[in-house]
């Protein structure tokens, strides 16, 4: 059966920045069947964040007027549902979806895909994607751009998805930082419960992470993954008085947060917001020795050599003086991982390291994570909303929501 509308996809790559063509696409500037001279609306995380800021700064509850709740308190799936409903009330001619499934768990992705499939019967859809498996089956053509010009309009069945090849063929550098008195059991949680006001978040959590283990923490949106991480890495007051043991010490028994963080390497997408100044690749990696945003101390010869070895592993030696901000999101993540690993901490926490990167970037970052797991003594705690085919953990700890708080089951 022939679809009633043309539906387009655009691969999200650094080769054709959105800022060059997206405004013109939304205004119907391009001669595309179903879109020419029409007005579109944009469904994206950036648009959603604008509405969240509008609520917080001006008490303008445009998207949640009937819910008696703020956007910030909704789950990612609920936020996106509210945004989609609001955009459709504007009666657009078409809708542009910019990586609509990022930050959603498997169940929420499935629900949103069903909604979009239904929507595709009544209006044209343009899907900007970075994961090939996010494509909707109704997509008919892929558009490619060169600056503001359309380079090609290719039927979906003829489109060649670009895949670069890469290999990390150098060994992980050895540690130059020594840790003493690190026990076999790094993290232990015994019957941990977390409540916020009248809401139960976690119930009877029992979890042990030992040396050199590779764990994948998984669970739907709102299941308490962030809360659980904050018990380990953050200064979450809910952990005090409970059976939470970090590197052999009970939380709240006199250790400083700084003592704990020195033993943990940590990266998350939110960290990118911290690095606004133009630091070089070399400075970024060396700063991991000091856990600083930027490099304010003169590094030792050994530290400079260690950073050079990591850049060699990442195939970035020729870019050591390149600005971190000018690199692709995937390469930025590789550098953040190297920065977190340069001290060879006992524990490496990777919070959503694959979000907002394309399939190539996902494979590249996954290869580095698997390599660290295989070649170093560091334990890894990897967190993601969705299953990742390229990640090969030893164990999975899955959170299952219940009315009394999420329960955790190790696998």
Image (cartoon, helix red, strand yellow):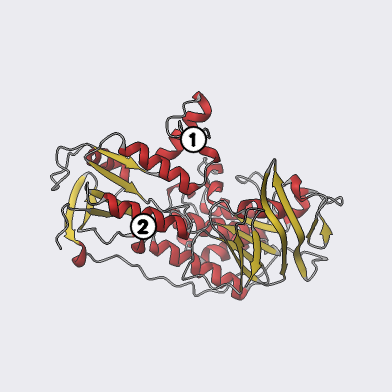
> What residue appears at the point 83 percent right and 59 percent down from the top-left corner?
249
Outermost residue to the right: 253
Q: In the figure, is residue 183 to the left or right of 154?
A: right
Q: Residues within 10 Å of mark 2 (few under 14, many from 20)?
A: many
Q: Quadrant of residue 178?
A: bottom right
Secondary-structure class at tag 1:
loop
Residue 20's quadrant in the figure? top left
| Residue situated in front as seen by the camera: 288 or 182 | 182
**Residue 396 in view:** yes
Q: Earlier in the sequence, mark 2 or mark 1?
A: 1
Residue 214: give its label: none
**Residue closer to the observer: 348 or 5:** 5
Residue farthest along the top direction in this orientation: 58
Q: Nearer the viewer, mark 2 or mark 1?
A: 1
The quarter of the image holding the N terminus is bottom left
Read off the residue under disc 1: 67
Percent x, y of residue 140: 20, 59
User: Are the residues at dot 2 and dot 1 in contact (C-beta closer than 8 Å)?
Assistant: no
Instruction: Report the quarter where the C terminus lies.
Output: bottom right
Residue at label 2? 130
Q: Position of residue 15 (x, y in %)?
A: 30, 53
Answer above or below: position of 241 versus 316: above
């Amino acid at each position: 059966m022939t679809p009633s509308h043309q539906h387009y996809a655009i691969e999200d790559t650094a080769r054709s920045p959105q800022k060059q063509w997206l405004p013109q696409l939304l205004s119907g500037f391009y001669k595309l069947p179903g879109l020419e001279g029409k007005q579109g609306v944009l469904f994206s995380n950036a648009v959603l964040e604008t509405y969240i800021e509008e609520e917080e700064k001006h008490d303008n509850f445009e998207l949640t007027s009937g819910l008696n709740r703020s956007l910030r308190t909704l789950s990612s799936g609920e936020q996106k549902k509210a945004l989609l409903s609001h955009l459709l009330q504007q009666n657009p001619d078409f809708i542009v979806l910019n990586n609509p499934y990022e930050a959603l768990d498997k169940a929420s992705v499935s629900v949103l895909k069903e909604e979009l499939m239904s929507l595709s019967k009544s209006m044209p859809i343009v899907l900007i994607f970075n994961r090939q498996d996010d494509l909707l089956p109704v997509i008919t053509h892929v558009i490619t751009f060169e600056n503001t010009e359309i380079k090609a309009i290719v039927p979906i069945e003829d489109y060649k998805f670009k895949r670069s090849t890469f290999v990390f063929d150098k060994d992980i550098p050895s540690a130059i930082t020594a840790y003493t008195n690190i026990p076999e059991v790094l993290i232990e949680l015994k019957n941990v419960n977390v409540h916020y006001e009248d809401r139960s978040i976690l119930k009877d959590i029992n979890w042990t992470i030992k040396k050199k283990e590779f764990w994948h923490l998984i669970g739907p949106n709102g299941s308490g993954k962030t809360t659980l991480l904050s018990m380990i890495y953050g200064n979450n007051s809910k952990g005090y008085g409970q059976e939470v043991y970090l590197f052999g010490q009970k939380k709240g028994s006199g250790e400083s947060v700084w003592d704990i963080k020195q033993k943990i390497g940590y990266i998350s997408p939110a960290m990118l917001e911290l690095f606004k100044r133009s630091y070089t690749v070399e400075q970024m990696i060396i700063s991991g020795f000091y856990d600083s945003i930027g490099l304010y101390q003169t590094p030792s010869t050994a530290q400079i050599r260690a950073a050079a070895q990591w850049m060699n592993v990442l195939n970035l030696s020729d870019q050591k003086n390149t600005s971190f901000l000018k690199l692709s999101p995937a390469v930025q993540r590789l550098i953040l991982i190297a920065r977190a690993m340069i001290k060879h901490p006992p524990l490496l926490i990777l919070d959503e390291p694959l979000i907002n990167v394309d399939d190539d970037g996902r494979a590249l970052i996954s290869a580095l994570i698997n390599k660290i797991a295989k070649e170093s003594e560091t334990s890894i705690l990897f967190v993601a909303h969705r299953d990742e085919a390229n990640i090969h953990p030893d164990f999975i700890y899955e959170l299952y929501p219940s009315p009394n708080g999420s329960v955790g089951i190790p696998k």
